[in-house]
Amino acid sequence: MRSIGGPELLVILIVFLLLFGGKKLPDVAKGIGEGIRNFKKSIRSEEEPAPEQKKTTNT
């Protein structure tokens, strides 16, 4: 499978611009960025072992 090159990326950006318009494009990009950030955060939290709860005793 090939990676996305310059011309393909340009076509994708033009399609996004036509679909969403210039005013909505920053909002769409922000939503995609937040989605990727949340996805990476959930992946990282699954890889890390769960912290053990410390037992506290009242003496």
Image (cartoon, helix red, strand yellow):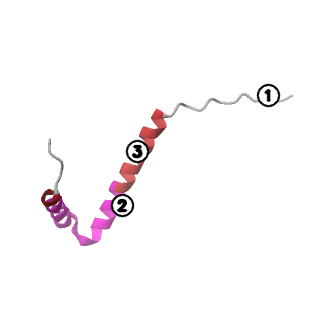
Q: CA distance from mark 1 to mark 2?
A: 46 Å
> Where is residue 4 drawn, in percent x and y?
17, 52
Instruction: Find the magenta span and give its range.
Output: 9-32
Question: Is the magenta region chiefly helix, strand or loop?
Answer: helix
Circle 3 or circle 1, nearest the eye: 3
Q: Which residue is mark 2?
A: 30
> Where is residue 46 drawn, in percent x and y?
46, 34
Image quarter where the N terminus lies is top left
Residue type indicated by callout 1: Thr
Secondary structure under badge 3? helix
Q: Is residue 46 above or below residue 38?
A: above
Q: Indicate the quadrant where residue 31 lies.
A: bottom left
Q: Indicate the quadrant where residue 5 lies.
A: bottom left
Secondary structure under badge 1? loop
Circle 3 or circle 2, nearest the eye: 3
Q: Cβ–Cβ below 8 Å for labels 3 and 1? A: no
> Where is residue 16 drawn, in percent x and y?
20, 62
Crowding near pointer 2: few (<14 within 10 Å), some, many (20+)?
A: few
Q: Is residue 21 above or below residue 49?
A: below
Q: CA distance from mark 3 to mark 1?
A: 37 Å
Q: Mark 3 or mark 1, which has the lower sequence index? A: 3
Q: Indicate the quadrant where residue 11 lies.
A: bottom left
Q: Which residue is mark 1?
A: 57
Secondary structure under badge 2? helix
Instruction: Say which mark, if any, is on residue 40.
Output: 3
